[in-house]
Amino acid sequence: MIAMTALAAPEAPYTVVAASRDDGPTLLEMSPQAARRLRESVPSVLVEKDRRISAAVRTATRLRMHRDWTVGASDGKRVRVKVTDPDGRPVPGARILVFADVAQREGVARRTRPSGVASLVVPARTGSFPRIVVEPPAGYRSLDAGAVAASAEGDIALTLAPVDPRGRDGTSALRGEAGTLTGLDVGRGVRIAVVDTGVDPRHPDLAHVATRNVYQFDADPAVAPHPHANHVAGLIGARGRDFRGMAPGATLFSYRFTPLGLKDGALFDLGEAIRRTGDDDVHLINISMASRSPSQFLGKAAVAAFQRGAICIAAAGNDGRDSISFPAAAKRYYAVTAYGDRSVLTDGVRELEDLSDVTSSVNAAMSRARFSNWGADTDFIGPGVGLISCAGAAGYAIDSGTSFAAPVIVGLAAAILAEDHPDILAMPPDMKRATAIAQVLTERCRDLGFAFETQGSGILHVADEA
């Protein structure tokens, strides 16, 4: 349970697990009955169950097992799918989706071994498959191979293209508009917090990011952070030779609230991380996390950040439903939905299926992302399908989700503030500054041709048309 105050009653039926600084929230271990008694005895204290919250990435494709494919090795035919790069080197860790029925989304999923091979057993008479999809590890593009026939020996060979960090994606036109294709100063003077799984500063494009670890109970400190934060931070402010974020001149702070290697953490730790961003007097806070469960605790954390002069920009969630996830739906969070741009997606990539039938009225190539939540609480929209960014300790990856639409908006916000509003950046860290930031961002939006529930005010437009 989370109690929104400092508690000190040694006889109380609870154990203090963690406590914030400055008489902030306290994490308690107690029974539901004890929590109810605490609420009744001290009505002024907010008592809330501590829940898990996870990175707002697109959920991996799932297939149901086809009824005719429940065969044993002795009764069926073994098929071997080998995945290599263009030079013939094996690609381990690729997730292979072999469809038996495309319409019913039935088939099997396998992951390639170090040899680059994934094996499966199918009915003896099966010689071809209506669709095979490869969801790649970092460093490679996805592949939708369509219908594929196996050789007489049951072998299938597939080749994955490497990720080119200079390749086109949904951010390309926006980078040109912001000037990040030509300069490293875009966003200079803006301080941004990435509250996430923890940036791995071993990546050369993110070596400038200052790291702050809020979660302090790691079992193995040698475990690397989950790469989600690198993808997020890279989109905001990577400073590479071949890849740059939307605002490479901004000052980035990484606040890790999850255990090392995991993409989910506790609400208490997320709220504590948002609180600690005040130590660095940030202007913008990126929250690429989502949960279906409302949280007054996280709502209060954003209100407190607003009072300190910062605004929280959050991912809308990836359930594909007409309701924004939390914390993005809460007061003082600015929710970002996602769209995809067909014109920058290469033929034969899996990401094409992430484009919904809800298209823009001004650009037919743009569609709301199939996975993106939407609703009355939407504030902005950003590209979130097939975005290139930093992967782990080195290299680059392509990923999708409202997790990645949010940092694009954060980076554009930094570009706008640095270029046109240094006066706002210089204001004292209080509610007046946060109000000014929010007002500027809302006014600097461009209509993308979607309904309000899908795009809110639209996408941030760096070039002021006024």
Image: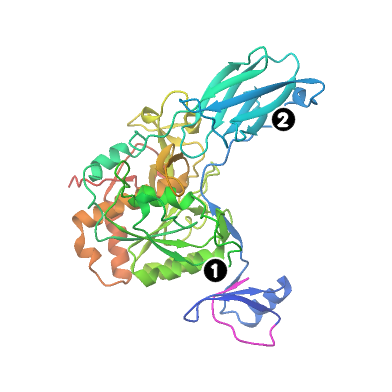
Which is more toward the observer, 178 or 103? 178
**Residue at mark 1 to residue at mark 2: CA–CA distance:** 41 Å
At horizontal 46% and vertical 68% (from top left) the residue drawn is 301
Q: Where is residue 457 in the image (x, y as percent from the top left)?
A: 34, 47
- Residue at numbered disc 1: 216
Considering every residue shown, the one lying at the far right of the view is 74
Residue type at mark 1 is Gln
Q: Does the magenta stretch include residue 6?
A: yes
> Magenta segment range?
1-12
At horizontal 52% and vertical 27% (from top left) the residue drawn is 84
Q: Position of residue 456 (x, y in %)?
A: 38, 47
Considering every residue shown, the one lying at the far top of the view is 152
At horizontal 21% and vertical 59% (from top left) the residue drawn is 421
Q: Do the residues labelled 1 and 2 touch (CB within 8 Å)?
A: no
Which is more toward the observer, 50 or 41? 50
Picture quadrant where residue 161 is located:
top left
Precedes in sequence: disc 1 or disc 2:
2
- Residue at numbered disc 2: 65
Q: Where is residue 46 in the image (x, y as percent from the top left)?
A: 57, 74
Left or right placement of residue 36 versus residue 21 in this view: right
**Which quadrant of the figure contains the N terminus?**
bottom right
